[in-house]
Amino acid sequence: MSITSAVQSPTVAPITTPIVTAQLKTVALLLGTAVVALLVYYFIGVDEGAMSVFGKSMVIHEFFHDGRHFLGFPCH
């Protein structure tokens, strides 16, 4: 018969390192991404020539014409 001693080792919480981010850089990156996404959405989905911010020119509309049909935007 062997005698075993139950030695309890103290539990140690794992050390965590916080993730440090530059909040201003993150906000600027998200804002820039949102602006670019809205511009792409405008040029592909909204610019209809007659309602264009560039006058009555159909250049932007015709440039994105096939892409807007491919993405499901009606234009005529």
Image: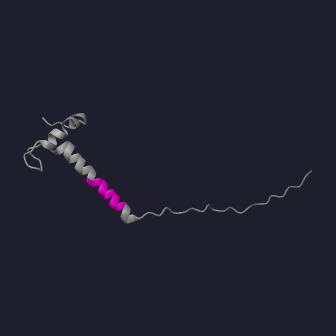
Dividing the picture into quarters, in which one does residue 73 lie? top left
61 on left or right of 18? left
Of the 4 image quadrants, the one containing the C terminus is top left
Residue at 89% across, 55% down: 3
Please state which of residues 5 and 28 is positioned toward the viewer in this rendering.
28
Residue at 24% across, 50% down: 38
Q: How is the image coloured?
A: one colour
59 on left or right of 21? left
Residue 45 pos. (x, y %): 20, 43
Residue 20 pos. (x, y %): 47, 64
Dividing the picture into quarters, in which one does residue 58 lie? top left
Residue 69 pos. (x, y %): 21, 34
Dividing the picture into quarters, in which one does residue 7 lie? bottom right
Q: Main secondary structure of the magenta part?
A: helix
Residue 63 pos. (x, y %): 18, 40
Residue at 23% across, 37% down: 67
Magenta highlight on residue 33: yes
18 on left or right of 38? right
In the orientation shown, which residue stands out farthest toward the right?
1
Chain part drawn in magenta? 26-35
Magenta highlight on residue 67: no
Residue at 29% across, 54% down: 34
